[in-house]
Image (cartoon, helix red, strand yellow):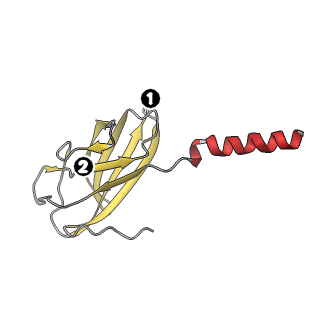
Amino acid sequence: MRAAVVVAVALLLAFCHPASADPMTLDFSWRGAHGCVTLFPNPEIRLRNIPAGGTSMTLTLAEGAREMGGQNVPVPGNGVVPSGTIRTFGPCKPGLYEWTALVKSSTGQVLSEAHQARFYPSDQTAAKQ
């Protein structure tokens, strides 16, 4: 009987533990984006599985190791960051560009991180590594 209780508790912890939750994801599209502008408005960015307790997030755009800027914004209740919410140095030449979202608690602790890379201007996603 004792072994059954231990197994039941272990299973309960495994299913209730945050690590078993789906990871946060980020998606966007370059469709309609006009690059080669100094202060590029972000495309619409959609986040899923934002962790509970997230109050703010940092969104950044990069081309390889070259950071192109970003900003801190409140976590959207519906998971959608509307186009034009932030400004970065925009993509100009064709290449692989990546958006990153870091969701933080009210104390600044990073709760989750998500990335999505797409080729500009074709909108093709990069192969997962």
- The one of 1 and 45 positioned closer to us in this rendering: 1
Residue depicted at x 20% and y 43%: 86
Task: Give the residue type at disc 1.
Answer: Thr
Rendered-image quadrant of the C terminus: bottom left
Neighbour tally class for label 2: few under 14, some 14-19, many 20 plus, Cα within 10 Å: some
Q: Looking at the picture, how far across and down is residue 68, in whole percent?
A: 24, 54
Of the numbered discs 1 and 2, the one sitting upstream in the chain is 2
Task: Give the residue type at disc 2.
Answer: Gly
Rendered-image quadrant of the N terminus: top right
Residue depicted at x 10% and y 55%: 37
The residue identified by callout 1 is 107
Q: Looking at the picture, how far across and down is residue 52, in whole percent?
A: 46, 35
Q: Which labelled disc corresponds to residue 83?
A: none
Question: Horizontally, is 59 left or right of 3 in the view?
Answer: left
- The one of 87 and 125 positioned closer to us in this rendering: 125
Classify mark 1: helix, strand or loop: loop
Question: Horizontally, is 8 left or right of 25 in the view?
Answer: right
**Looking at the image, do the residues carrying marks 1 and 2 touch, with CB atoms under 8 Å apart?**
no
Q: Looking at the picture, how far across and down is residue 49, in whole percent?
A: 43, 45
Image quadrant where residue 108 sits: top left
- Report the Cα–Cα distance between label 1 and label 2: 23 Å
Classify mark 2: helix, strand or loop: strand
The residue identified by callout 2 is 69
Residue found farthest to the top: 106
